[in-house]
Amino acid sequence: MWWKTTSVILLIYAIVAGLLVPLKPGIDRVSPDSALTGSRLDMQIHGYNTWYSRGNTADIRVWLQYDSLRAVAGTDIRVISDTTLAVSFQLPTTLPDGGESDMLNLIVSHPTDGVSLLPSALEIEADTSASSSAANWTDNPVEKLHVVRDFSYPYRNVIYETIRNTYFHVPMWFALMFMFLVSVVYSIKYLTRPDETSDQKAVAFTETGLLFGLLGLTTGMLWAHYAWGKAWSNDIKQLMTAVALLVYAAYFILRASFDEPEKGARLAAVYNIFAFSSLVPLLYIVPRLFASLHPGATGNPAFGSQDLDNTMRLVFYPSIIGFILLGVWIANIRYRILRIQQLADDQD
């Protein structure tokens, strides 16, 4: 059927584009990462996937930004390598708002790489003993940025290349929700008008949803290993995911605990409705009530427009559709197997 071909094409596209499209240039770290007001700061900028040696050095511009209106421009910019820049700043003697310390963003504008931003790159502390300096916070200093338009993914510190897992880990949860939704629809249909077809399809879609749940949990643990330092950290999102999968695993235990298939199917259908109603609180509501390393929880917002940009959407949404269609395909195959097994049992 056409939708099977579509699922294969979309998944191949997601895999190829998801793994081969490069990340945008970014800033990995700076050294030093702290300074006093009124001092001269000689900083080294360490880039990621950058080509600082390309183009004219005179066209490179660097700023330490206090807010959207105030910043200090870098001087004496020197290219050390493709991934390392040296720049000097004469820091003003006071912070604009008169505070004792604050964090400054670093902005690099390069003719080849475009614009790179490292939030909270430098901690600056007020030095009351500093002598007066001619340097000052300049209004609206960040201007004439180099805009480079290409097909690449956003660079984000901490996750780096693992941002590509967005195309696999997240769509699997969309597929899981769809499989469990179709499963509960067949369970309700079985309760209103009992027939083996509805029951077997409910089982097939539940099994497929559980499969995607296990795959989603596994890809999430791999992602956590690189982003958080270990695969399992008892994060609230991880714990609630494990609970949700155990709730659905109990669906099959319940079915197998009855000698009468019809009675087991009936109670399993009722339980399936309960399991689906608990899915949204476990996966989406409870994790948002607690602090978590996982995006979408308290203190850690989910992907925004800067994280899931238009380039990523061109891969992300087709991947969701592809995984859902693949799930329907697997569920239909599983239903046919259950049907064949039932026909074989009836003939014995």
Image (cartoon, rainbow, N blue to C red):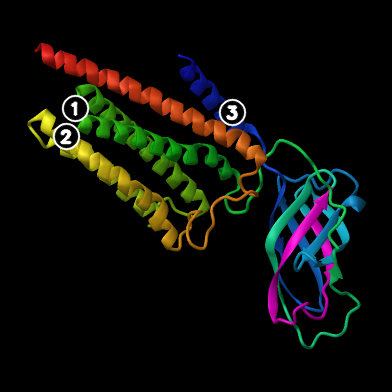
Q: Is residue 235 visible?
A: no
Please identify the residue farthest to the front as the structure is shown. 192
Q: Residues within 10 Å of mark 1 (few under 14, many from 20)?
A: some
Classify residue 198 as left or right of residue 302.
left
Q: CA distance from mark 1 to mark 2?
A: 8 Å
Frontmost residue, 20 versus 265? 265
Which amino acid, mark 1? Pro
Residue indicated by mark 3: 16
Work out whether 18 lies above or below 295: above
Question: Disc 1 vs disc 2: Cβ atoms closer than 8 Å?
Answer: yes
- Quadrant occupied by the C terminus: top left
Q: Is 91 a magenta residue?
A: yes
Q: Majority secondary structure of the magenta segment?
A: strand
Element under label 1?
A: loop
Q: Which of the 4 image quarters holds residue 258?
A: top left
Residue 342 falls in image quadrant: top left
Q: Which residue is mark 2?
A: 266
Q: CA distance from mark 1 to mark 3?
A: 45 Å
Numbered disc 3: secondary structure: helix
Q: Which mark's residue is nearer the viewer, 3 or 2?
A: 2
Q: Residue at x 25, y 33 (%)?
A: 187
Label 2 CA crowd tier, 10 Å (few <14, some 14–19, many 20+) = some
**Residue 11 sits inside the magenta stretch:** no
Q: Seen in the image, is 316 located left or right of residue 271?
A: right
Give amino acid for label 3. Val
Q: Is residue 281 above or below residue 179?
A: below
**Residue at image point 53% right, 41% down:** 166
Q: Nearer the viewer, mark 1 or mark 3?
A: 1
Task: Identify which residue, 188 or 205, lies in the foreground.
Answer: 188
Instruction: Compute the Cα span from label 3 to label 2.
Output: 44 Å
